[in-house]
Image: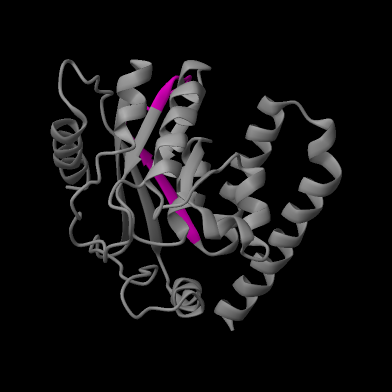
Amino acid sequence: MRALQRLLRLLLHVAIGLWTIKWRFPRLSQPERDAAVQAWAHRMLACAGVELRVLGEVPQTGPVLLAANHISWLDILVMHAARHCRFISKSDIEHWPLIGTLATAGGTLYITRESRRDALRVVHHMAQCLSAQDVLAVFPEGTTGDGSSVLPFHANLFQAAISADAPVVPVGLSFTDARSGEISFAPCYVGDDILLGSIWRTLCAQNLVAVVHFGPAQRAQGRDRRRWAKDLRDAVIGLRG
């Protein structure tokens, strides 16, 4: 019954978000839109019964690129709730019902992963956004893990930070059980998991805490993107404890 109640609240909140995008966003400035997205994401977590815990120093202004590990469909909501940012995401999400509309309204930049030319276009666009003082976010693993480890980081998108001479902030994401302190696998979306199954497990979970740990900002300081990617992955592992 608790999960069903959460589901109903979640669906209602999604509807409110879509209404806001259609009727309010055209009259809002970009900072007002960013604040609305952050508030909506924070409320979305509450509807799902997820407590947000933010550690470390949250970047207040851009330019900055946030680099986080990837566990679940919840990660984007968690990151938005902790600090509004523009995500880099695979292009097919743009066409997903509901989710695509919400992602686009949040300022997502889309990339066709199979196309090298499109990757170069996105890196160039990212560098322009960073030069314009934006806060961007990437999941350098390129896919989700189960939360117990961090996969190797793909280095290509870090070229944008090098080109714009912008800092990168490593971010460690984890989901834990508030009572035991152990890792919670309820929100995982990996392997044979289906989205609906992950959502239902999340809604059924009790004492679920999403932890967002921001680390110190790093600059390339002469490192190429591959070496920097490895160092950032090590930092994310450390932030996850």
Was residue 52 drawn as part of the magenta stretch in this picture?
yes
Colour theme: one colour
Residue 32 drawn at (x, y percent): 71, 29
Residue 133 drawn at (x, y percent): 50, 18
Residue 208 as seen in the image, left or right of residue 229: right
Residue 225, above or below 119: above
Quarter of the image holding residue 58? top left
> Which image quadrant: the N terminus?
bottom right
Which residue, as the protein is rendered here, is positioned at the far front? Answer: 117
Quarter of the image holding residue 224? top left
Which residue, as the protein is rendered here, is positioned at the far bottom? Answer: 1
Was residue 11 drawn as part of the magenta stretch in this picture?
no
- Residue pictured at 25% horizontal, 46% vertical: 154
Residue 215 visible in the snapshot:
yes
Q: Nearer the viewer, residue 197 or 47?
A: 197
- Residue pictured at 31% horizontal, 60% vertical: 176
Residue 222 drawn at (x, y percent): 15, 16
Residue 237, above or below 65: below
Residue 167 visible in the snapshot:
no
Residue 89 as seen in the image, left or right of residue 95: left
Give the number of callouts.
0
Residue 81 drawn at (x, y percent): 52, 43
Residue 80 as seen in the image, left or right of residue 70: right
Q: Nearer the viewer, residue 51 or 88?
A: 88
- Residue pictured at 26% horizontal, 66% vertical: 146
- Residue pictured at 39% horizontal, 57% vertical: 209
What span is colored magenta in the figure?
A: 50-64
